[in-house]
Image: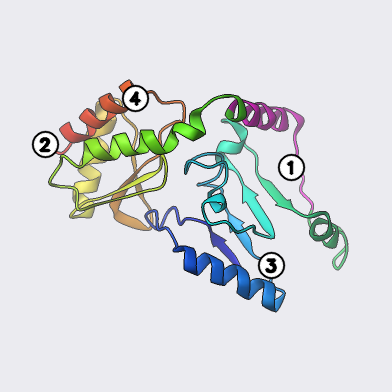
Amino acid sequence: MIIETIQGDAGLIKPTQEFITALREKCTETGALLIFDEVQVGMGRTGKMFAFEHYNVIPDILTLGKALGGGMPIGAFIASTDIMHSLTHNPMLGHITTFGGHPINCAAANACINVLKEEDWIAEAEQKGQLLQDILTQSSEITAIRRAGLFLAIELASEEKVAQVVKNCLEKGLIGFWFLSTPTAFRLSPPLSITKEEIKEAGEIILDSFE
């Protein structure tokens, strides 16, 4: 069973605790592997190092990418030794990669993890995300805000309005982007290192972009 712990491109849809608990129990009961895709929501984005920590369950396999490399391209497949070993046969070498595990990229990922452990950015993600949400609620044109830590989906009345706001923000020096699968919303996922002053500035830029 493969799911995003929190759906990203669907417009930031968070599952309920009951759903995740039932899913874990069903997979355990049937012997199915529970795989969480945290390429978008892992590495502190939601206020925890991994989004599944919000649900008090542990997947059998976790996939990571994007922020893991701190800007360098890298992906990770994380599982127990037994599960990893099962990939060595039937078929033989069933999980191999030509460019995986490049030493420079791995060094970058290791450095990124160390920084996240040393700084308070993950612990501050919820507070920073709430600050940005509070600023944006001043706009009557926003129909909904869905948020997990410092990851926000801003729902507007139309796809055209989203395109206008994203374009205006870019012209003012702020990068946002619509969700490919949810064109009536745009995403905000600023660096975890963003300051409160920068959040306030970003919020004002976004509010001005509705005009």
Provide the secondary structure element on which disc 1 rests.
Answer: loop
Between the residue at mark 4 and the residue at mark 1, the CA separation in whole angstroms equals: 37 Å
Range of the magenta residues? 96-115
**Which residue sits at x=20%, y=50%?**
160
Mark 3 crowdedness (10 Å alpha carbons): few <14, some 14-19, many ≥20: some
Where does label 1 land, which residue?
100
Q: Which residue is mark 2?
A: 211
Can residue 107 be found in the magenta stretch? yes
Closer mark to the observer between disc 3 and disc 1: 3
* Residue type (three-letter) at the residue carrying disc 2: Glu
Q: Earlier in the sequence, mark 2 or mark 3?
A: 3
Marks 2/3: CA–CA distance: 49 Å
Q: Which residue is mark 4?
A: 196
List x then y, in percent, for residue 16.
44, 63
Q: Quadrant of residue 49?
A: top right
Picture quadrant where residue 174 is located: top left
Decide which of 33, 98 is in the foreground and name it.
Answer: 33
**Callout in the foreground (2, 3):** 3
Q: Secondary structure at mark 3?
A: loop
Task: Quote the CA–CA distance across marks 3 and 1.
Answer: 23 Å
Q: CA distance from mark 4 to mark 3?
A: 40 Å
Q: Is residue 48 above or below residue 4?
A: above
